[in-house]
Amino acid sequence: MTVPTAPASDAVPLEALLITLPTADGDVSMVSLRRFEELGLRSPERLPVTVKILLEMALRRHRDRAVSLSWIERVLLGDTDALGSFEFYPERILLQDLTGLPVLADLVTVLDADRPGGDRARFEVPVDLVVDHSLEVGSTGHPSALQENLAIEHARNEERFAFLRWAVDAFEGLEVIPPGNGIVHQLNMERLASVVTVHPAASQRSTRPLAVPDTLVGTDSHTPMVNALGVLGWGVGGIAAELAILGLGVSSDCRAVVELRLEGSLPEGSCAFDLALLLADRLRREGVHGALLEVTGSGAAQLTLADRATVANMAPEYGATTVFFPVDGATLAYLRQTGRSHGHIDMVDRYTREQGMDAAAEGVFARTIVVDLGDAGRSVAGPTRPQQRCPLGSSPGVEDVPGRGPGEVVALAALTSCTTTSNPRLMVAAGLIARQAVALGLRCPDWVKTPFTPGSRSVPAYLDHLGLLAPLEELGFHVAGFGCGPCHGNAGELDPGLVDRLAGSEAVPVAVLSGNRNFPLRVHRELGSAYLMSPALVVCHALAGRRNPDVMTEPLGFGRGGEPVYLRDLWPADNVIDDLVDRIPPYLLGPDLGAVSWPSTAHAKNGPWSDDQPGGRFLRPPFAACLAAWPPGPLRRARLLAVLGDEVTTDDISPVGRIAPDSPAGTYLQSCGLAKDDLGTFGAWRGNHEVMVRGAFTGPACSVAGAMGPDGSVMARAKSHRDAGVASVVVAGHSYGMGSSRDWAAKGPRLLGVAAILAVGFERIHRSNLIGLGITPLRFPAGTDVRTLSLDGSEELDLEVPEGAEPGRQVRVIVRRRGAVVADVLAERDVMDGAEEEFLAAGGALSHVARHRRRQAFGE
């Protein structure tokens, strides 16, 4: 954040804003925003709570310099341009293993943590890493599925887990939660988040501890789930997280703080997930790209904390950075339910009320979007995007073919993801439907795979307490693991006889899941279509064995006496659901972390790298080295590596699912001596750049005819460009890089020699990732795109950068086809601030940090 300093006549020191706050556990200090009025400035009351948090952070981070009163006044007037592009300094960092392991591998190199005999490297900001993305759901539908999958998880990830245990010893400030405990976001809500953090007095110029808002960034794009708890934080790429861990700021933007006003109430039979799907549809069309959404309204007050978490979780699907709910009584109740101490809850209550962060008054917002909760009827979203919402009973899909069987056969019905399994009301509804279905004699067809992967160990605990776990198990929904499984592609194998069953029909196998993303082939490599829905509807579709557009009127199955059973026969009344939720004892909602610990086999090894092992999981990463940067002068005769369309996801650019034996990555691993059955997933190989680069641009959206040019091989095409001594460029449509915060979607292109990506628009996290790897994001001028230029992949591009390039400056792009100029346009450099300019000039953020550390150590 650009915080101007000023002479004494126009300045206020931090000490002038410090006050003492009495709490049940003793006095603490705090930076009081209310003191502005005593200094003759405006009251901060009408500021959005998110801006209050950022203002407090800015004042505290600049405690060694007096801050300009005129700048504060502009912020208090609601001038969010005064905040502008800013550096966000989070109080903590949250990682999961899929994205976190590459972060740690990079930091080993940057901090020389593998130096023999060296002291432990110190993280400037505390880091929690939850191992939750290594689960592969190979075993389902029986009581031993949980233990079998956990054993498989440890066996297949022995080298990765050993690296983590080594990292705990190598880094001061790193805590790792072993696999089998739950999904990172739900554990963040239940245990890790504090809402208000207290710094020891020794670390501040004060005789008392200093209370500050709990803030964070996470390397999973669904980090905003914790916004429901009044904690400001969002997802970032791995490189941005590495900079934050080193004590550097995360480049951010606060030019759009949007009020999301919720009114009305949810209709009978609908739930918070239906509301989340409504928001994904509505907000994508409203255009809230990169906005900080702050929730207000009478409708918000009616939502439970768990409902708010369900809504906030899907901020990336809305296109937003945050979906922030200020602290209120529901927040404090949740803290009590999940075992926070009385003293801590008292401090949270007192601090947020004193700062005016306990509720969003009539704030000054860039704009207001009003959503009526009454519009959130039961719905599904699919077949390939979360925003493809349709009311239940009218969803699109393959229609039935008379005499040829059902149009869409449910091959996978998954109760999964932090979005829904974090919400007791959603899980109780699913359990009640299962209980009624069992009572009527219904069972799921044997071709439906039914994995149940809750977000934490609290879920089966309270379901069992209410008598609802057993009926779910009778339908095949035995707990298969505590982690993120089918929701990110680790669903395991499907029924092997399904293909034979579908022979001779036009039926198409699909997935239904209570997750938050359904990009093509993401949920399963054999399923091109997937539908998002509440856990209750997942159970209903599993019983039917098909995704029926007429589910509201046609029977789901037939009972013991052959009588038809309809959706209305199974669906519980809202008051019945609410009554059972109220019976859940608080002690079941917040189990201790570490309930599952590392087995003795997951021992720490002597060093982090496996460079001497063909096909090793951890090769020394090249990204902290001084890679060649795009020079400030013109880039001549660059060639197109790929010509892509709209909404290319990070799943397309860097797949996460299982590695096919005949793929470039599969062929490489087999050449290293691995068997076809041992190739695993791309997610498990994120420490091996030789594997990961071979997966770049191999997703569905990158495999269309002609996308890679005549030879069809991205690896071969990139090599031909390097051999010719020219850089590669990728061109694409709007929303390039939507989806997960996947740093390998930038690392892979970087290793392939991509210098720039020219697109209509970029998703926020991916844009940051590209800059962190030294790849320049360029935006087409209005009215120009891939289609208007009729690019076919054979073109050469000259990119001319003006000297002294600044954020937002234009780049002249000259496109030649067979030597003739076919286009000459001005593209805009999508660069936010001076820090990002420095990263690009250095060839990437880690190269920049490595050079800075060398200058400090050796005076270079």
Image (cartoon, helix red, strand yellow):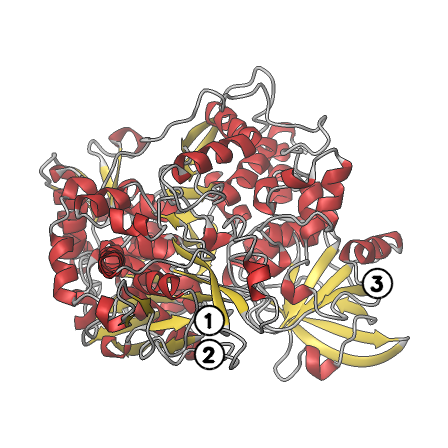
Instruction: Name the residue that disc number 2 marks.
Output: 396
Disc sitting over residue 854 in the figure: none
Furthest residue toward front = 561
- Which amino acid lies under the numbered mark 2 shown in the image of this protein? Pro
- Above or below — where is 261 with respect to 480? below
Determine the residue positioned at 64% across, 60% down.
699
- Which residue is nearer to you in this view: 569 or 823? 569
Q: Residue furthest top?
A: 117
Label 3 belongs to which residue?
711
Residue 120 image point, x, y percent: 49, 22
Q: Amino acid at mark 3?
A: Asp
What distance separates the C-alpha of mark 3 from that of mark 1? 33 Å
Give x and y (percent) for residue 830. 59, 66
Q: Amino acid at mark 1?
A: Gly
Is residue 568 shown left or right of residue 290?
left
Q: Toward which corner of the image does residue 357 lie, by quadrant?
A: bottom left
Q: Is residue 588 visible?
A: yes
Look at the image and tell me in which quarter the C terminus lies. Answer: top right
- In front: 767, or 715? 715
Of callouts 3 and 1, the N-terminal one = 1
Q: Are marks 2 and 1 in contact (CB under 8 Å)?
A: yes
Question: Which residue corresponds to mark 1?
Answer: 382
Question: In the rendering, at what x and y percent does residue 130 appear?
Answer: 41, 39
258 with respect to 331 (left or right): right
- The answer to whether any part of residue 521 appears in the image is no
Q: Of 355 and 101, which appears nearest the observer?
A: 101
Determine the secondary structure under disc 3: loop
User: Which marked residue is nearer to the observer: mark 3 or mark 1?
Assistant: 1
Quadrant where the N terminus is found in the figure = bottom left
Instruction: Say above or below: 696 vs 145.
Output: below
- Mark closer to the chain start, 2 or 1: 1
